[in-house]
C-alpha cells in the first residue's frame, strides 16, 4: 500500500511539474479601434474623384508630408469577426480607400511590434500604399454626409511579417453578407493620420489588414453611393479584398 501511495504521489508530482512548465496560450488581443474591424472590397470603377488630389498627412512616420492620391481602390465596411461585434453590420461608419501615388522619401520601418486578435508579431513597413478617409454610403441613392466625427483617417503601409501569428479560419459578417475566410498573410498595417491639419480624433489607432482565401459566401456589392470629404461618388465594389482588424503597436 505504501509503495502504491508513493508511486501515485510521484506521478502527481510529475504532472504538476509538467503543467507548470508548459507554455501558456497568449490571451486574445482586446484592441479597440474607432473604425472597428473592417471588411474591405475592391473598387473597380468610380465617377467623380479627381485623381491627382494632394493632401498633407502627419502620422507616426511623416510630419506634414505632401501625398498625391490616385484612384479610389477600396470600400471598407464595418464587420463582425467571429461573432465579436454583432452590431457591426449596422454601423454607418465606413472608410473609402485611395491609392497613394507619390509621397515624401521613406526609408521604411523595421522591428514594429504589432498585437492583434490573432497574436503578436514583428512587422516591416515598406512604403505607404493607401489613404482611408471616413465615408457614408447608400445602396440606392446618395447618402447624407457622415455625422460621426470620431472616425479616424488611416494611412496604410505595405507590410511584411506576421510569421508568429496563427492564420485561422474566421467567419465575417457585414451588411453585404456572411463568409468564411482563411487568413493567409499580413498585407498592410495602417495607423491613424492627420489629414490637412484636421487632427486625429483618436490617436494611437492601428489596423492590421490580412489577405485571405474565401471559403464560402463570397459577396459582390455592385454600385455603392459614397460621400466623403472629397465629395459624392459612386464606387463599383467588387469582391472582398482584405480583412482589417483593430491592433496595438508597442516598442
Image (cartoon, helix red, strand yellow):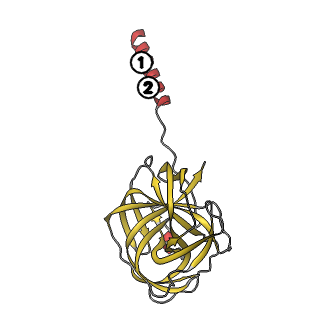
Relative to 71, residue 23 above or below: above
- The secondary structure type at the circle numbered 1 is helix
Q: In which quarter of the view is residue 229 placed?
A: bottom right
Q: In which quarter of the view is residue 242 placed?
A: bottom left
Q: Can residue 156 be seen in this view?
A: yes
Q: In this view, which residue lies farthest toward the front?
A: 105
The location of residue 31, given as percent across then percent down, is 56, 56
The location of residue 79, given as percent across then percent down, is 47, 67
Badge nearest the viewer, 2 or 1: 2
Sequence-first tag of 2 and 1: 1
Foreground residue among 88 and 75: 75
The location of residue 13, given as percent across then percent down, is 47, 21
Q: Is residue 118 left or right of residue 249?
A: left
| Residue at image point 37% right, 61% down | 212
The location of residue 250, given as percent across then percent down, is 60, 50
Q: Quadrant of the N terminus?
A: top left
Which numbered circle lies on residue 159? none
Which numbered circle lies on residue 8? 1
Q: In this view, which residue lies farthest toward the top?
A: 2
Amino acid at each position: 500500500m505504501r509503495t502504491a501511495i508513493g508511486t501515485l504521489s510521484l506521478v502527481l508530482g510529475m504532472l504538476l511539474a509538467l503543467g507548470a512548465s508548459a507554455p501558456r496560450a497568449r490571451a486574445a488581443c482586446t484592441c479597440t479601434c474607432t473604425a472597428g474591424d473592417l471588411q474591405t472590397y475592391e473598387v473597380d470603377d468610380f465617377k467623380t474623384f479627381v485623381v491627382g488630389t494632394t493632401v498633407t498627412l502627419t502620422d507616426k512616420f511623416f510630419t506634414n508630408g505632401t501625398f498625391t492620391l490616385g484612384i479610389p481602390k477600396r470600400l471598407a465596411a464595418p464587420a463582425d469577426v467571429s461573432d465579436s461585434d454583432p452590431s457591426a453590420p449596422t454601423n454607418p461608419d465606413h472608410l473609402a480607400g485611395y491609392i497613394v501615388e507619390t509621397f515624401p522619401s521613406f526609408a521604411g520601418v523595421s522591428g514594429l511590434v504589432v498585437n492583434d486578435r490573432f497574436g503578436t508579431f514583428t512587422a516591416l513597413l515598406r512604403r505607404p500604399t493607401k489613404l482611408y478617409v471616413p465615408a457614408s454610403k447608400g445602396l440606392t441613392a446618395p447618402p447624407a454626409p457622415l455625422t460621426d466625427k470620431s472616425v479616424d483617417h488611416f494611412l496604410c503601409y505595405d507590410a511584411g511579417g506576421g510569421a508568429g501569428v496563427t492564420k485561422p479560419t474566421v467567419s465575417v459578417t457585414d451588411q453585404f453578407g456572411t463568409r468564411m475566410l482563411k487568413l493567409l498573410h499580413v498585407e498592410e498595417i495602417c495607423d491613424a493620420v492627420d489629414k490637412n491639419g484636421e487632427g486625429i480624433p483618436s490617436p494611437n489607432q492601428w489596423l492590421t489588414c490580412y489577405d485571405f482565401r474565401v471559403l464560402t459566401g463570397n459577396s459582390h456589392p455592385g454600385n455603392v453611393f459614397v460621400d466623403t470629404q472629397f465629395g459624392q461618388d459612386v464606387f463599383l465594389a467588387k469582391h472582398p479584398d482584405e480583412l482589417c482588424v483593430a491592433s496595438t503597436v508597442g516598442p
